[in-house]
Image: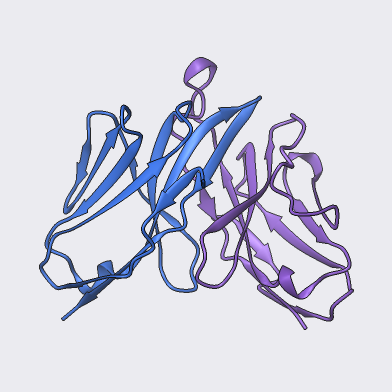
Chain colours: A blue, B purple
Amino acid sequence: RKEVEQDPGPFNVPEGATVAFNCTYSNSASQSFFWYRQDCRKEPKLLMSVYSSGNEDGRFTAQLNRASQYISLLIRDSKLSDSATYLCVVNRLEGAGNMLTFGGGTRLMVKP
Amino acid sequence: GAGVSQSPSNKVTEKGKDVELRCDPISGHTALYWYRQSLGQGLEFLIYFQGNSAPDKSGLPSDRFSAERTGGSVSTLTIQRTQQEDSAVYLCASSLVTQTGWFRGAFEKLFFGSGTQLSVL
């Protein structure tokens, strides 16, 4: 079993739709969590961190459920520009440093 | 520099040759990661450098892969006797760990370079 798992999609949604992605992680020692966005043939870029209390940034809402070991990302009022791959990232302490593990990504395609 | 710089951006090589990929992280960033990404796949962890600590090499797929980080700054990833399955985009990322103690690393933002596309013929 992979340490961080995501549904690869693709999720095909019309503009204006609400779409949600989930990500599960297997290591209960994981400490911090992030969503990254990766456009085609580009490097990943941080979208938002995920906090236990849940956090919102405009149309994007991230939630963390430690008991069930999953993270979610909700996108409201989807835009064409939201089309990308969304990567779930889990961080845990490993020895003297940090181990950041990426999920395989969920591909989103927003259609007109 | 303003961001993480990787070179070359593209590398085409013949099977069996050695290649060196370079990463110049953001100045002052203590942590440096190498990942690789095959077409349509997620990021595969290769190696991690944190300050002066011994690197975490647990992700290196074989002994043909090695990396070093000189003076805590520039890093070089070397692949010896390249194979076709080594073809991928090799991404470097750096970060500044913003916390110390038990909470360290809790808010670690990665900055990625634009990657090196390696093609082994």
Q: Position of residue B45 (x, y in %)?
A: 62, 50
Name the residue nearer the viewer: B101 or B83. Answer: B83
- Residue B13, percent across and down? 80, 79
Image coordinates of residue B101 in percent, x first then y, are: 53, 16
Q: Please name the residue shown 46% across and 30% down the image.
A: A30
In the rendered image, the residue lying farthest to the front is A1
Residue at image x 19%, y 43%?
Answer: A56
Above/below status of A52 relative to B84 = above
Classify residue A16 as left or right of residue B17.
left
Report which quarter residue B89 is drawn in: bottom right
Q: In terms of depth relative to the viewer, which is nearer, A29 or A15? A: A29
Quadrant hosting residue A55:
top left
Q: Eyeballing the image, is A94 above or below A87? A: above
Quarter holding the N terminus of chain B is bottom right
Q: Is residue B26 left or right of residue B87?
A: left
Q: Nearer the viewer, residue A63 or B75?
A: A63
Residue farthest top in this picture: B101
The percent position of residue B81, horizontal first and vertical second, equals: 88, 68
Q: How many marks?
A: 0
Which corner quadrant holds the C terminus of chain B? bottom right
Q: Is residue B102 left or right of residue A16?
A: right
| Residue at x-position 84% and y-position 81% | B14
Left or right, A59 with respect to A6, comes to left
Identify the residue shown where x is 69% and y is 32%.
B51
